[in-house]
Image: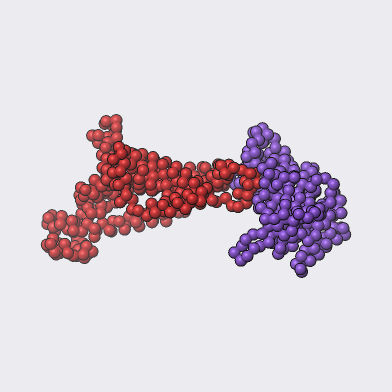
Amino acid sequence: MTRLIRPVLAMVLALMALWYVAVLPMNVKETLTQAERAGAVIAPPSAVERRDMSNWALVLNNTHALGESWNLDRPRLPAPHQVLTELYASTIGEEVTGRRGIVKTGTLSNRSLIYHGLITLNATFVGFLIGTGLGVVLAVGIVHSRVMDMSVMPWAIVSQTIPIVALAPMIIVVLYSIGIQGLLPKAVISAYLSFFPVVVGMVKGLRAPDSMQLDLMRTYSAEPMTVLTKLRLPSSVPYLFASLKIAIAASLVGAIVGELPVQQGGLGARMLAGSYYGQTAQIWAALLMAAGLAAVLVWLIGVIERRTLRRMGMMA
Amino acid sequence: MSEPAPILAESAAPVIRAQHLDLTFQAADGPVHALKDVSLDIPKGSFVSFIGPSGCGKTTLLRCIAALEHPTGGSLSVNGMTPNEARRKRAYGYVFQAAGLYPWRTIGRNIALPLEIMGYSKTQQKERIAKVLDLVELSGFENKFPWQLSGGMQQRASIARALAFDADLLLMDEPFGALDEIVRDRLNEELLGLWRRTEKTIAFVTHSIPEAVYLSTHIVVMSPRPGRITDVIESPLPWERPLDIRDTPEFIEIAHRVREGLRAGYQE
């Protein structure tokens, strides 16, 4: 493990370096305009001329005036340290020193990513539970009924080919029209994304017992229910966990997408707000927060998976 | 229906009686006669081996007795019932080619599996697990997981699982086929001891001539295409069989007869 730390760190540093370099061409026009106002000589001197030039050419022609690239107020691509600063400011900073932070008011600030992250997390969990439950039930049905296998599975596959961003607003509108709003519509979108990996994994898992293991059950004249609980379900556990890791990440994506059209809090709402007001650092901070959440959730499932499999004797 | 020809003459009512048994599979390139006109009586308390090359129907016959396959002709009774009824009455324990223990259950819980399904109480389960583990000499391994045991020990555990619910009939489908010679010899010896102690009827599928001759009171020689019985040999060997009985002239003579029977099946 310790031998891997150095190469992994080197990889992270290389990615950061790439990001810093990419900031140059992405922000060059704004940087040069600012430098020109501050009195630097820029080639070519007119912003109109510069508009049609390629970003890299501008970078190479004006290497002396790029100092502010990584510190712009409204960058197209914020530098990593700007994103981290924003992330800190909108989490710990906002809560500890902010006027509405938890330290001053006792409740989470509605401008902090912690507040919005928790909103998203709520929807993610509810959606994940619905999706997993639905997935397991459908898989059990598919494995036991030829009719369900032929009727449900194709629809499940088709359902995943529809872009969720197109479907999400319709789900929200339809649910709103029957009086459901708030957490549930987002959870439904989450569930819509997360049931599928569970169905696929569980169908495979429930069918994992070989013919000998099934024959053994037949020699005991076991009922289908017994075969399910004593053979199929235990066999499917490793498959289930593989699916759950995908499902929880998909749930998070679903919750975020569900927050885009509604604008009532959540990481999705923050991302969209950031793009309305050109606050790219805010978008990136929300993105980072979402990525971090996803990583933690997947890791958590991994921990539960290892514990469960060890208890089941399926992992040394 | 013509008069059955009991091949294994015995006074007591046979545990298994097959009369003109046929089983034809419909394959893509025409029918396959897995079993054709198989008639056989297996008397209570006997140890019957089925031997023959692959495709001779020996496993199919065993699966018919277990009601895992269904004959397309003739009649078959187990304990005087149809195989299906017999299965529902828990008439037999079945041991497969591989141990087939459930990896998420300890050895003890694997043996408890049939007992759970058949509705034995917790105390009865405990009692029986201890008893059969002792029978197969695995006491002390109750809480181990299957992967912690050697292949031979796993197969012993699967025999214990088949013994746990006191079926009088034990059906064994090449149970030691995947094990090495030394382990196999030892398990053969143990199986004979177990059979004598428990007085069960054992139907045993194998493709090893020495194994068949060493274990059996009756050896059923089968041949393929179509799967049928070509010879039934009643063993004159004594019940007490140390492993070195395999070097005696009697043993070699029976083995020779089995080999001849197998060869005859091929030449037809």
Residue B182 visible in the displayed image? no
Residue A34 placement: quadrant: bottom left
Residue B81 placement: quadrant: top right
Residue A129 visible in the displayed image? yes
Q: Residue at x 44, y 50 (%)?
A: A152
Q: Residue at x 60, y 52 (%)?
A: A211
Q: Residue at x 31, y 41 (%)?
A: A175
Nearer the observer, A198 or B44:
B44
* Residue A239: % across, % down: 50, 49
Residue farthest front in this picture? B1
Task: Please give left or right for residue A153 compared with residue B8 in the image.
Answer: left
Chain B rendered in what hue? Answer: purple
Q: Residue at x 76, y 65 (%)?
A: B265
* Residue B127: % across, % down: 70, 35
Q: How is the image coloured?
A: by chain
Task: Please give left or right for residue B123 compared with residue A54 in the image.
Answer: right
Residue farthest bottom in this picture? B267
What chain is colored red? A
Q: Relative to B96, is B108 above or below?
A: above
Nearer the observer, A114 or B103:
B103
* Residue B141: % across, % down: 67, 42
* Residue B29: % across, % down: 61, 66
Nearer the observer, A222 or B81:
B81
